[in-house]
């Protein structure tokens, strides 16, 4: 099998797996303690958690704190539901943001969804026109999970802060891939399994002095914002994955751009969805008019790629992201997404491209 679905999840790094194994201790070990217990085993586990927290924090601005969550979806919900004022976001955001509209509106707050430009980037003129003194939060992705487009974050943050609003950045597809430490939003939401860490853990980064209402009540763990016993194993795996990402970010950017060039050449006859200039090159979303994607995926079942977001797969609906950039239903349904990264080889790209193009030709395209 060839795995080309890095936007859905990434392979667990062997180093992260090794770090996790130590904290999955059985009754003969001393590493299964609750990190919130005061005894020696608890303090050992707590130390592992705090070490992981520092490793994740190193990928983000220094003037803030990291709160561990079950994933980025929880982190996004925590801020969207716990920050006062109206919310503004964009049409290509993840469902974890867009589906909070009903909850926000039930609280008596407005939830405004703005358009994006034809290349998939945020429409800053629309943001400038929509923002008001009542706006409490602007939510925006760093990198789109379906088409790989990088949004103009610095300009978005400047517009929001000038109006007195806070900014929530969904950095799931960017953290560990792009440098984020020079940006100054109020919140970052990140996920471990999109950067070669384990599933089931993510984090919310909050700038110093920024507050959010408690989201899960109970024992008061995680700064009283998110109660529940932390998993030292998940935290440790996340931490090592973050540490590895920080160490080889430049190398991986070069590797991914090299793979992109190979893939783009291989799919030169396909139309690219989203900006070619402003993008993460580990995401190639292309379309071929008239393509039957379901048949293509069946014919290429040894290649793991996507017809859209894994979170919305099986719905039968055309991608809301592709519709937002102006594609018709037919064009959206004739699009595929290839995602690649650290463990992808040139041979993977070349073999997959040959198989996909051959299968497309079998459809007469």
Image (spheres, rainbow, N blue to C red):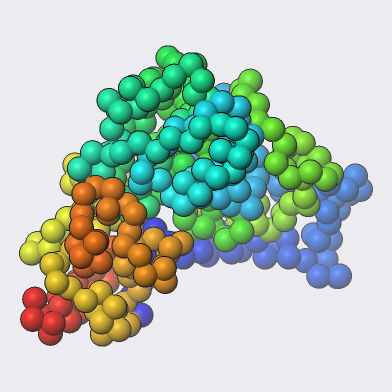
Looking at the image, which is closer to me, 257 or 275? 275
Quadrant where the C terminus sits is: bottom left
Say if 323 sits above or below 118 in the image: below
Asked if residue 254 can be seen in this view, the reply is: no
The number of discs equals: 0
Q: Quadrant of residue 353?
A: bottom left
Say if 194 sits above or below 291 in the image: above
Residue 309 percent across, percent down from the top left: 39, 61
Residue 226 percent across, percent down from the top left: 72, 43
Looking at the image, which is closer to me, 149 or 95? 95
Residue 170 percent across, percent down from the top left: 46, 42
Residue 241 percent across, percent down from the top left: 53, 53
Q: Is residue 229 left or right of residue 314?
A: right
Quadrant where the N terminus sits is: bottom left
Residue at x 28%, y 48% (from the top left corner):
324
Q: Is residue 108 left or right of residue 245?
A: right
Asked if residue 218 can be seen in this view, the reply is: yes
Looking at the image, which is closer to me, 213 or 176? 213
Say if 89 sits above or below 234 in the image: above
Residue at x 47%, y 55% (from the top left corner):
194
Residue at x 21%, y 76% (from the top left corner):
292
Residue at x 84%, y 44% (from the top left corner):
219
Which residue appears farthest toward the right when viewing the image? Answer: 39
């Amino acid at each position: 099998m060839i795995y080309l679905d890095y936007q859905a999840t990434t392979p667990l790094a062997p180093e992260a797996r090794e770090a996790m194994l130590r904290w999955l201790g059985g009754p003969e070990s001393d590493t299964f303690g609750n990190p919130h217990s005061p005894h020696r085993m608890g303090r050992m586990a707590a130390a592992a958690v705090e070490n992981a927290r520092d490793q994740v924090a190193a990928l983000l601005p220094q003037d803030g704190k990291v709160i561990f969550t079950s994933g980025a979806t929880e982190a996004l919900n925590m801020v969207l539901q716990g920050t006062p004022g109206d919310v503004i976001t964009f049409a290509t955001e993840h469902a974890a943001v867009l589906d909070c509209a009903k909850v926000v509106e039930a609280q008596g707050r407005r939830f405004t969804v703005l358009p994006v430009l034809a290349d998939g980037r945020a429409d800053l003129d629309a943001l400038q026109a929509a923002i008001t003194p009542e706006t409490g939060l602007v939510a925006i992705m760093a990198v789109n999970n379906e088409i790989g487009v990088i949004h103009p974050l610095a300009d978005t943050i400047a517009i929001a802060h000038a109006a007195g609003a806070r900014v929530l950045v969904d950095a799931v597809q960017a953290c560990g891939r792009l440098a984020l430490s020079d940006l100054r939003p109020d919140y970052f939401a990140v996920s471990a399994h999109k950067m070669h860490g384990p599933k089931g853990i993510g984090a919310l980064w909050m700038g110093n002095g920024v507050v959010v209402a408690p989201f899960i009540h109970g024992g008061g763990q995680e700064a009283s914002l998110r109660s529940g016993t932390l998993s030292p194993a998940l935290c440790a795996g996340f931490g090592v994955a973050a540490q590895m990402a920080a160490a080889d970010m430049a190398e991986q950017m070069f590797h991914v751009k090299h793979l992109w060039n190979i893939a783009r050449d291989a799919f030169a006859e396909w139309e690219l969805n989203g900006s070619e200039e402003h993008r993460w090159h580990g995401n190639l979303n292309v379309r071929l008019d008239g393509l039957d994607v379901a048949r293509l995926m069946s014919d290429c079942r040894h290649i793991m790629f996507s017809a859209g977001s894994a979170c919305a797969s099986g719905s039968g609906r055309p991608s809301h992201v592709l519709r937002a950039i102006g594609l018709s239903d037919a064009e959206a349904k004739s699009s595929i997404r290839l995602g690649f990264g650290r463990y992808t080889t040139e041979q993977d790209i070349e073999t997959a491209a040959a198989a996909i193009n051959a299968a497309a030709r079998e459809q007469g395209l």
